[in-house]
Amino acid sequence: MTYDLVLTGGRVLDPLRHFDAKTDVAFNDGKVAAIGPALAKDARSVRDVAGKLVTPGLIDLHTHVYWGGTSLGIDPEMLARRSACTTLVDAGSAGPGNFVGFRKHIIEPSPIRILPYINISFAGIFAFSKAVMVGENSDIRLVDPVECVRVARQHMDLIVGIKARVGGVASFGTGIAALDIALAAADELGVPLMAHLDRPPPASHEVLPRLRPGDILTHCFRPFPGGPVFGDGKLREEVVAARQRGVIFDVGHGGGSFGFRSARAALAAGFEPDVISSDAHELSIDGPAFDLLVTLSKMLCLGMTLEAVIKAATSSAASALRRPELGTLAAGGVGDASVLSIENGRFEYVDVIGETFTGEQRIFPAGMVVGGKWLETVR
């Protein structure tokens, strides 16, 4: 067989299949055609990736890429090329009132796969900037479950769930009401909910018990207040109970939602995140989050294994999305792959409250395959 493209000589790591070996990956007709040795001799195009790590296409479960349509949106292709992500999940930038524009002007023309959560708020996240910050759920008149369900049903080929943001910023003055309304909409549609919790109120002991198996708590390693641990480093009871119930915990770094102290304490207690995501947006893309690879690098340097961090951005993210065709490399499967360079040295990392530490490893992009076609990345 003649292959369209072969990646040769790299270390192929597919956590879902417990596969870790130096070998080749071949692509044909937009799919993975074969994995094995000596495939390059039968290829129309060959990319030598010796010394690099080849993984299933990375999935960033929390981004904001309604570029030009919302104040926090960033260019999805730029983000993908600097993070070697083949799937970007938009975490509720658009609501029922502007979802059609997001689909037509950003999602459909994008060379990168974009899967959206729809915001329970009619206007989506409409006022998120350095100059203006108004929570989309601070006016309960914007939170209409009937409109959310109506629009979502028209786009169920794309939509992966409902997004609700609550907290002292996102739902100032309305408390937890938007979350309850969003859960009702998610129940009606039979889809998961992604919950954002910023500074209380409400607090985690109010939010987490409401979440169902398969729902996602993003920003799971927030700094105080609202972090997953008490001052003594012990995990909060509601965090433990939610994991036992099947709630999914996502890092969702962002500009205000990741603290080294919380992460270290949770890891020390044996609590690793299910998913690692960047929450890259206009206020976090230039730091402290930057992108998914920087966030993965932080978790790697904090003590997670390489296989664990890759799993958290591939098969575990795909499972959270209920898209099992993504996040793995298997013959006949989706032809997406990320090529990464893992470098040793001294790298300074910073969290959202300004704490820094020096790590000894950093993951950089070295290329990507989307639908069987090679795309250059930007370092």
Image: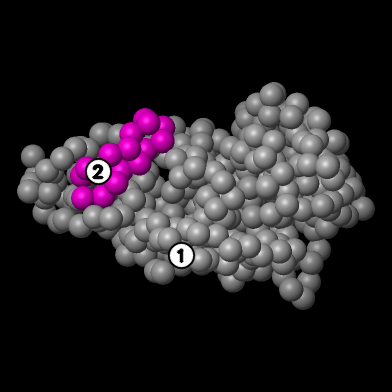
Is residue 164 located in the magenta-colored stretch of the structure?
no
Residue at image location 85% in from the left, 36% down from the top: 205
Q: Is the magenta stretch mostly helix, strand or loop?
A: strand
Q: Name the residue under label 1.
A: 345
Residue at image location 79% in from the left, 37% down from the top: 234
Q: How many labels sit on residues?
A: 2
Q: Mark 2 points at which residue?
A: 22
Q: In this view, does 80 lie to the left or right of 202?
A: left
Identify the magenta region.
9-24
Front one among 360 and 183? 360
Is residue 22 located in the magenta-colored stretch of the structure?
yes
Q: Quadrant of the C terminus?
A: bottom left
Residue 354: x %, y % from top left = 72, 67
Q: Quadrant of the N terminus?
A: top left
Spot the residue most to the bottom. 131
Q: What element carries label 1?
A: strand
- Front disc: 2 or 1: 1
Front one among 90 and 341? 341
